[in-house]
Image (cartoon, grey):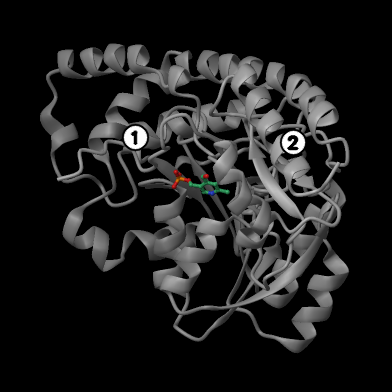
Amino acid sequence: MKLQTTQVYIPPGVIDLGLGNPAPRLLPLDLLQQSAQACFERKDPSCLQYGAESGDGYFRRALSAFLGRRYGFPVDADSLFITAGASSGLDLLCSLYTRPGDVIFVEEPSYFLALRIFADHGLRLVSVRTDEAGLVIEDLTQKLRRFRPRLLYIIPTYQNPSGQTLSQERRERLARISREHDLMIIADEVYHFLNYSGLPPRPLAGYTQETRIVSLNSFSKILAPGLRLGWIQADKSIIRRLSLCGLLDSGGGMNPFVSALVRSLLENGKLDAHIARLKSVYAERIPIVEAALRKYLPDAVYTRPQGGYFFWVRLPGIDTQRLQEQAQAFKVDIRPGVRFSSRKGMNEYFRLCFAYYEADEIKRGIRRLGKCLQSMGQP
Ligand SMILES: Cc1ncc(COP(=O)(O)O)c(C=O)c1O
């Protein structure tokens, strides 16, 4: 038996620059210990009962207040549905709103593990181009003339892997297109609250009323992925459809116990304080990573991330899949761009995460990557 406790095993001595996990030292054991204590002191056993289908009402109320405050517009608790994380929300939406063989649109590049979920559902992917302002609307409208997609999946803010953010103007156009074409748009907004310079544009969560835009979000990046807790914000007709599904009829709402723990962190402001800490730690790493890229990978092309977890780095003329293979000998790993492409593209790119490792380790990893490139005959 392999006594592995976390999803990813990193061989000793290897620096995995591709890993998109939060820093272990920032996982808030102390906060959860306090909230567990408060929860048990309430002596209310309902958190251990089968939960309400759309999620515990008190929790949804606390979440709606938190979101309303952070987004700057009111969020109706009845527009929220509690999930076991963004991945579980996406999987459930695919179960209810797609059939095998359906076409769906995804960004090029897109989050590689969402692509795995779509593959599980037998969906056919058509990619839509992106640029520095996110999804290219002209390419979307052109493809809407050729295909009738069941949905569009998009990561509008601090995208995984590219770090790009969809501009405000394109958000408005996307909302119009959703209405005009009756197109379901699943906006995965898990990095929205991790902004390091200025505020992001209005979340797509703000366009969900009376459109078929669905906002997916999660506590994985702002608190801890092991909680397996997230939410969907959508028009009430979609929330009703989700709440009536067989999965919840049998099992009850998702994660009522964890919801009860996180509820007090929403109510007592400790989640806000924790997010502020995450932002300050992650933001400090960015200039250090940039300096290391300049020094050890002088040909690297990238845009400084304004939020989220990732640098999306292009190495002109380099096949990053080959680089990854060669990098094993130098004890460093990356995620090659092709993993994020639904059409086997992005070969000169790789994803570098600055959340998991401390800045010094990231620097060391980039130095190793530089040595590896030199060994391949590159500058
Ligand atoms: C864009 C995106 N969506 C979803 C997830 C997974 O979210 P969750 O842990 O809530 O399932 C990630 C994590 O890397 C992500 O980057």
Q: Position of residue 235 (x, y in %)?
A: 54, 57
Mark 1 is on which residue type? Answer: Leu
User: Is 66 placed above or below 76 here?
Assistant: above
Give the spatial CA distance, label 2 vs label 1: 37 Å
Mark sitting on residue 256: none
Left or right of 379: which side holds 358? Answer: left
Tell me the residue at 54%/64% (across/down): 115
Task: State the residue position of label 2.
Answer: 370
- Front label number (2 vs 1): 2
Tell me the residue at 65%/15% (across/down): 280
Does dot 2 land on a helix, a strand or a loop? helix
Asked if the residue under mark 1 is in contact with the one under mark 2, i.e. CB atoms within 8 Å, the reply is no
Quarter of the image that includes the C terminus? top right
Q: Quarter of the image holding residue 331?
A: top right
Q: Position of residue 112 (x, y in %)?
A: 56, 58
Residue 227 visible, this angle: yes
In the image, 81 versus 317, the foreground residue is: 317
User: Is 146 placed above or below 358 here?
Assistant: below
Mark before the other along the chain sequence, 2 or 1 = 1
Mark 2 is on which residue type? Answer: Gly
Q: Position of residue 177 (x, y in %)?
A: 76, 69
In the image, 50 versus 29, the foreground residue is: 29
Task: State the residue position of label 1.
Answer: 227
Quarter of the image that includes the N terminus? top left
Queried on whether the Cβ of the residue with tag 1 lies below 8 angstroms from ligand 1, the answer reads no
Q: Quarter of the image holding residue 360?
A: top right
